[in-house]
Image (cartoon, coloured by chain):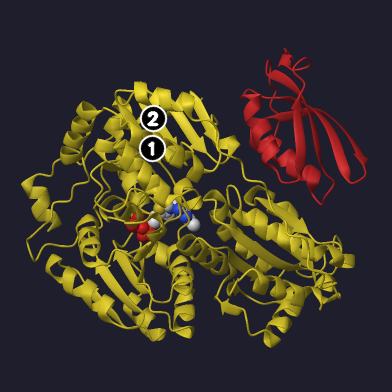
């Protein structure tokens, strides 16, 4: 068995059935081995960035390891954005690239790039294989590393000669990274019981630890009001009365108000990202903090925790749940206060019943949320539409919401939807894109056609880079700069070129039929939704400001309303 | 670009043991830089596939933050902060 065959063999042994890749010179031995291999489905995307983002979507939706493969040089550099995306959101990923032959490294050979050097900051770990005998152990170690503790991408760069060298098919010793145990919760529990206004603050770490069930049991037992980060949306389940929604820059007024007023923040699997906290000095100014995370480096990174609990989230949350079921918290006044805020300061979208009214993002997303089944997966791109999804779509599970949180990668949604569809061919997967983002990986329509994937694509087309336009309007005296996309291509004609049927809507009374039509269609379908160019995402906190300085939508005058209509 | 002249930054001494893999040192230096510290002295020794590195650093951020980021690196076996040698120094 040569190195390339060994890699496929390792995939088999680890039940990795789907990989996303693109061939080329130095990775050719692996593609040659694929010809004989029937156990690994290789998905050919049309750009390596999309291979990495599809592997990310596959991993997020399923909780399994995502795998992407590319050749040396431009293949590897094209992967970088997708791998950085996975790194910032702690997605388990294995990246395999071919490299020029060992003896050619450092000679500026054709398609040589220093992949190891240029990717150091975007991987959990990386290897340059310099000895074929080491390959089996590296493969085992890499897969264990990518999926354990705080997950992340692990990159293996393999010179072509090593892919062709015979390796001993010895069963390598299983590599495992020790998981931290469950720390003592006594001090934190006492602090929690003492608090009069405790608030649960959860992030993407909950589903990364596969701790969704334990989290919900804990949230119910504590009955604490809760807020979520962008990646924590769905942690509490759909329509949970304790859930105040997303906090932060585009968070709900209720969530940000509760953070401001709470006397204890109970942080679970969140890293106090600046989009969530706003200016740190003004964040939760009256609160003590209990910070629970599997990654020691996240605890007290930005704000010193009063009690830090590092370990496996499942074990820690179960320990709290046992205690709280025995003796519940008494926080009735605070709970009622938060309910009032929830009623008056949740995400509002005037459900415009006027049938001829133009469509707005929030109104469209609310209808989408009502019409789709609970297990629908929504893969977003980046911009205003992403925030409207976060605000107005009710997710029942965090794995149903695929969004590029840390890196904010335009072009994420379509390949991520492809990956998610491969992870569960029976689920409805919808890419909600902006017209700008859609064009960043539009070539993936070819992948959808090739594999006959029933991915639904919704483009909320405001004819501009809406999120940038909004910030230019609000924070740069409305000096619009390079945001116009009024020369967009004909999206429906594009879809047609890939045998994908499409539909265009522009009025409120067309929303339901539009959504129902694409959902009812057995294959892929594109819904082109024209929305107003001027619509903004509200509320908003100015970058660098405190969350309590959040700005609400200025009340529109009747004249303005008519103008928009 | 002119190098920044920093006047009075706290200084620290760390020792770090890590596997002598490809790009080991670059990985270490990359983390030090991105987490906001400057290396003012470095001494290293390679024995039996291990690198022992002594670093003198300066930076205004809490050193504990850098230490925990370095400890997170897969190839790092341990990081020790020399409390005695670490102090606020004036340049
Ligand atoms: C790859 C990439 N380039 C640039 C940006 C900066 N950016 C953030 S949002 C945005 C506009 C997105 O426009 P569109 O996809 O049309 O969505 P909209 O905001 O209009 O809903 C831009 C350019 C980014 N996040 N990612």
Q: If you read the primary sequence from the N terminus, does the residue marked by circle 2 or circle 1 appear first?
A: 1
Q: Nearer the viewer, residue A325 or A274?
A: A325
Badge 1 local density, few (<14 within 10 Å), some, or many (20+)?
many
- C-alpha separation, residue under disc 2 versus residue under disc 1: 7 Å
* A121 lies left or right of A268: right
- The answer, for residue A228, to whether it is visible in the render is no
> Percent position (x, y) of residue B2?
71, 31
**Circle 1 chain:** A
Give the colour chain B carries in the figure: red
> Percent position (x, y) of residue A316?
49, 39
**Measuring 67% from the left and 71% from the top, which residue is drawn there?**
A13
**Measuring 55% from the left and 38% from the top, which residue is drawn there?**
A182
**Measuring 28% from the left and 48% from the top, which residue is drawn there?**
A537
Describe the element under mark 2 as helix, strand or loop: strand
Q: Which chain wears yellow?
A: A
Which picture quadrant has residue A161?
Answer: bottom right
Badge 2 local density, few (<14 within 10 Å), some, or many (20+)?
many
* A471 lies left or right of A110: left
Q: Which mark is residue A201?
A: 1
């Amino acid at each position: 068995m040569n190195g390339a065959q060994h890699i496929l063999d390792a995939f088999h042994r680890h039940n990795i059935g789907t990989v996303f890749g693109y061939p080329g010179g130095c990775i050719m031995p692996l593609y040659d081995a694929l010809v004989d291999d029937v156990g690994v489905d290789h998905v050919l995307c049309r750009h390596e960035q999309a291979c990495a983002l599809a592997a990310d979507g596959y991993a997020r939706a399923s909780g399994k390891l995502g795998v992407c493969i590319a050749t040396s040089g431009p293949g590897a550099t094209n992967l970088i954005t997708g791998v950085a995306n996975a790194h910032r959101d702690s997605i388990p990923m294995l990246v395999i690239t071919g490299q020029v032959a060992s003896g050619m490294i450092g000679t500026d050979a054709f398609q040589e790039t220093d992949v190891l050097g240029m990717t150091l900051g975007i991987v959990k770990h990386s290897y340059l294989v310099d000895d074929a005998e080491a390959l089996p152990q590296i493969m085992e170690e890499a897969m264990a590393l990518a999926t354990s503790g705080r997950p992340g991408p692990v990159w293996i760069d393999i010179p072509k000669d090593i892919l062709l060298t015979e390796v001993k098919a010895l069963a390598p010793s299983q590599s495992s990274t020790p998981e931290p145990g469950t720390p003592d919760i006594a001090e934190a529990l006492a602090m929690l019981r003492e608090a009069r206004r405790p608030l649960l603050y959860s992030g993407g770490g909950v589903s990364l630890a596969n701790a969704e069930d334990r989290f919900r049991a804990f949230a119910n037992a504590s009955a604490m009001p809760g807020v979520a980060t962008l990646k924590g949306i769905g942690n509490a389940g759909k329509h949970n009365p304790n859930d105040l929604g997303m906090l932060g820059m585009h968070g709900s007024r209720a969530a940000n108000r509760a953070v401001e007023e709470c006397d204890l923040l109970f942080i679970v699997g969140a890293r106090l990202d600046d989009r969530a906290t706003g200016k740190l000095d003004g964040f939760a100014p009256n609160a003590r903090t209990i910070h629970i995370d599997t990654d020691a480096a996240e605890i007290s990174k930005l704000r010193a925790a009063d009690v830090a609990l590092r370990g496996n989230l499942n074990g820690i949350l179960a320990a709290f749940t046992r205690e709280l079921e025995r003796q519940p918290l008494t926080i009735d006044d605070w709970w009622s206060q938060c309910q009032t805020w929830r009623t008056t300061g949740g995400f509002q979208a005037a459900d415009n019943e006027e049938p001829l009214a133009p469509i707005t993002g929030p109104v469209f997303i609310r209808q989408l949320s009502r019409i789709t089944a609970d297990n629908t997966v929504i893969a977003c791109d980046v911009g205003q539409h992403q925030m409207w999804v976060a605000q107005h779509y009710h997710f029942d599970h965090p794995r149903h919401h695929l969004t590029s949180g840390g890196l904010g990668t335009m072009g994420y949604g379509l390949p991520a939807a492809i990956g998610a569809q491969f992870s569960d061919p029976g689920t409805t997967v919808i890419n909600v894109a902006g017209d700008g983002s859609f064009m960043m990986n539009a070539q993936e329509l070819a992948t959808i056609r090739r594999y006959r994937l029933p991915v639904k694509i919704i483009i909320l087309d405001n004819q501009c880079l809406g999120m940038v336009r909004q910030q230019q309007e609000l924070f740069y005296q409305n000096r619009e700069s390079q945001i116009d996309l009024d020369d967009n291509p004909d999206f429906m004609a594009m879809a047609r070129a890939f045998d994908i049927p499409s539909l265009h809507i522009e009025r409120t009374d067309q929303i339901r039929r539009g959504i129902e039509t694409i959902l009812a269609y057995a294959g892929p379908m594109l819904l082109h939704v024209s929305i107003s160019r001027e619509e903004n995402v509200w509320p908003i906190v100015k970058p660098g400001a405190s969350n309590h300085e959040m700005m609400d939508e200025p009340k529109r005058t009747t004249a303005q309303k008519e103008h928009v209509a | 670009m002119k190098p920044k002249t920093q006047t009075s930054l706290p200084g620290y001494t760390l020792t770090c043991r890590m596997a002598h893999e490809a790009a080991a040192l670059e990985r270490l230096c990359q983390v030090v830089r991105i987490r906001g510290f400057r290396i003012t002295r470095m001494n290293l020794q390679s024995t039996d596939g291990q690198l022992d590195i002594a670093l003198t650093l300066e930076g205004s951020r809490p050193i504990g933050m850098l230490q925990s980021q370095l400890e997170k690196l897969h190839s790092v076996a341990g990081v020790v902060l020399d409390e005695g040698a670490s102090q606020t120094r004036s340049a």
